[in-house]
Image: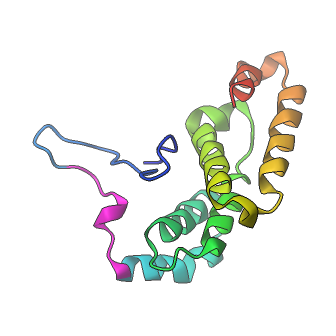
Amino acid sequence: MLSPASQNEPFKPFFVFPDGHRSAIPDDLTATDVGFFAEIAETVTNIRLRARLADLVCLKGKSRNVNFALMAIDAYRAIPLDAETWVHDGEKCWERAISLAQMIKVSAGDRLEQMETHIVASFNAATRQDGFLGLWLARR
């Protein structure tokens, strides 16, 4: 489960059972798993899955290849900024994209500025029909 508030541990278990068992976390992945994710990430068409795979490779890969951070950022920020998406996972995805861009600094190019521009434009375009989207975007 994406938990972007933590830069070092952006993925938490989805379930933690009373007996201590839990769903998978990145530390459960083997080097083979991470290598496989690195091989397929670029070909995955589902943007959420591409973002997570690239993020995992960036996080757990041995070389910390900035290209996977950039792929994750680009996939996360491709997620629409609308009210329905925001409440499901959009907020966390955009927050992780911003966090990754801040972590890799100059290597992110102008992505941080582009994200800011897109968030401000979405805020300015928000209407009453968008519910609390404007408020949510203002918090970012």
Q: Can residue 46 be seen in this view?
A: no
The vertical placement of 136 against 106, above or below, is above
Instruction: Specify whether 3 is left or right of 48.
Output: left
Q: What is the x, y in percent for residue 87?
A: 60, 32
User: Which residue is rendered at x = 33% and y = 70% of the image?
Assistant: 29
Magenta range: 22-31
* Quadrant assignment, res 50: bottom right
User: Which residue is rendered at x = 44% and y = 53% of the image?
Assistant: 8
Instruction: Specify whether 53 is left or right of 29.
Output: right
Quadrant for the C terminus in the image: top right
Is 25 magenta? The answer is yes
Q: What is the x, y in percent for residue 37?
A: 49, 76
* Quadrant assignment, res 126: top right
Q: Residue most toward the left?
A: 19
Instruction: Specify whether 98 is left or right of 115.
Output: left
Closer to the camera in the image, 33 or 130? 33
Is 49 magenta? The answer is no
How was this image coloured? rainbow
Q: Residue most toward the top?
A: 128
User: Which residue is rendered at x = 43% and y = 69% of the image?
Assistant: 60
